[in-house]
Image (cartoon, helix red, strand yellow):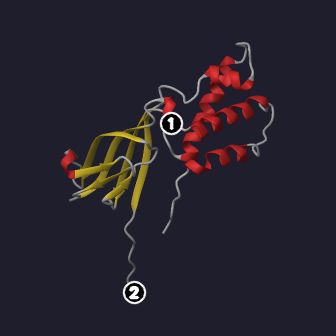
Amino acid sequence: MEFYMLESSMLCITRKSNPISLPITLLEVKSFLRVNNNTDDELINNLISIASEYAQWYIEKSLTKQLWQISCSGYIPRKIQLPFNPIIKVNYVKIIHINDIEELIDERYYHVDIVQSHILLHTQNNVNRIEILYEAGYTDTSLIPAQIKHGILHHVAVAYKNRESENTNLLTFIKDIYSPFRELKLVL
């Protein structure tokens, strides 16, 4: 009796640079919270950062400009989805051959679909692994959908007003705000 393994890929996504800015400002949050002093500025800034990260990971979008690397080994598909869109640009595509020789791939040998957030490889001979370095995120915070910003504001407000509590049920409301921005994923 023979057993066959299905070809599979191993994908790894790594953020190579942290966001330089946040989707909302301290001033916006303090206005939303009706805070008129500077006593909790450090706390509020930390909550903005945490809420922004939560939003980003939940909806799988880069809210501000960041650098990402995706690595794929094993079976290398011709079409590779680039998570944490919107894609700004692909910096490079590098293949690592079976003999561990690295090679940068010329742009003529792949196509980047910024709208669909994927890269289509035209060739893939003797490839052990592929690495793609790309920039993603909204180039201006004014382009971030208002509903996402609204969700971050509410997340900060909930965390700020309930900082002594461990009640995670309040996040259901926040997830509902973000849900239209999540992409449907089918597992076959």
At x 33% / y 45%, what residue is drawn? 132
Residue hosting label 1: 63
Q: What is the x, y in percent for residue 150?
A: 64, 36
At x 76% / y 46%, what residue is drawn? 169
Residue hosting label 2: 1
Disc 2 packing (10 Å; few <14; some 14–19; many ≥20): few
Mark 1 touching mark 2, by CB under 8 A? no
Can you tell which quarter of the image residue 43 is in? top right
Say whether residue 173 is visible: yes
Say whether residue 105 is visible: no
Secondary structure at badge 2 equals loop
Give the amino acid type for the residue marked by disc 1 in the picture: Leu
- The answer to whether 32 is drawn above or below residue 155 in the figure is above
**102 lies left or right of 72:** left
Q: Nearer the viewer, residue 91 or 94?
A: 91
Q: What is the x, y in percent for residue 98?
A: 24, 56
Q: What is the x, y in percent for residue 65?
A: 44, 32
Give the amino acid type for the residue marked by disc 2 in the picture: Met
At x 61% / y 40%, what residue is drawn? 147
- The answer to whether 6 is drawn above or below residue 153 in the figure is below
